[in-house]
Amino acid sequence: MKQIMYLTPNKHSKIASKLADCIFRVTNGAISFFVCSEIPKEVSSNTVLILSKQMQSITLFHPNLPVLISSDASGISDSLMKQHAQTVYSCGFGEHDCISFSSVLSAPCMISLNRTVETLDGNLVDPFEIPIAFHTKHVFSALSCVLALLLCDISPETIFTKLSFDNP
């Protein structure tokens, strides 16, 4: 079973709750979601890691797992590179980020996958740009949720049909 693990020092954050809700809504519970303050030593190879912006450092026991970080978390990025993390994806507003928001100031807002990514099952997802119907104050959470779902082989069509961040 595929799983998404959100690493944060605050295990009871509203963002963790929103992520869990969104992942459940999109996958109907087919993908497990865990919130941890550190990476367990035993982690399935079918895991995607999302590092919260509040994580100051992390020790990777499995450098082959995909790791999603905020593009403004340069310290954690340097730490991951020193640990030879092989698949680090950044989320933000820049064209160099793997996934980003674009056209934020105009309607409709767009989410852009800026490069081809390989899913946990080895499938390729080509770059795309899709208008989104939801609005969010939690930019990194929305982008990392979309990218984590893509890496878990959920189609963009399924994600954007079911995803909502600010609605209950």
Image: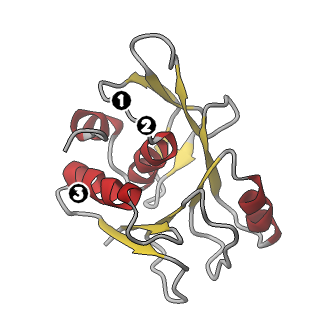
Q: Given the image, on which type of amino acid does mark 1 rest?
A: His
Quarter of the rendering containing residue 102: top right
Residues tagged 2 and 3 counted as in contact (Cβ below 8 A): no
Q: Which mark is residue 135?
A: 1
- Colour option used: secondary structure
C-alpha gap between disc 3 and disc 1: 19 Å
Q: Position of residue 145 (x, y in %)?
A: 41, 49
Q: Residue at x 59, y 32 (%)?
A: 114
Mark whose residue sits in front, 3 or 1: 1
Q: Given the image, on which type of amino acid does mark 3 rest?
A: Phe
Q: In the figure, 62 relative to 75: above or below?
A: below
Q: Residue at x 38, y 69 (%)?
A: 12
- What SS does tag 3 mark? helix
Q: Which mark is residue 65?
A: none
Crowd rating for badge 1 (residues with CA inside 10 Å; few <14, some 14–19, many 20+): few
Closer to the N terminus: mark 2 or mark 3?
3
Q: Position of residue 121 (x, y in %)?
A: 43, 60
Which quarter shows the N terminus? bottom left
- 112 with respect to 107 (left or right): right
Q: Position of residue 50 (x, y in %)?
A: 51, 61
Q: Position of residue 62 (x, y in %)?
A: 61, 78
- Seen from the viewer's position, the closer of residues 60 and 103 is 103
Crowd rating for badge 2 (residues with CA inside 10 Å; few <14, some 14–19, many 20+): few
- Seen from the viewer's position, the closer of residues 12 and 130 is 12
Q: Residue at x 55, y 89 (%)?
A: 41
Q: Which residue is mark 2?
A: 137
Q: Name the outermost residue toward the top.
A: 106
Closer to the N terminus: mark 3 or mark 1?
3
Q: Given the image, on which type of amino acid does mark 2 rest?
A: Lys
- What SS does tag 1 mark? loop
- What SS does tag 2 mark? loop
Q: Which residue is mark 3?
A: 24
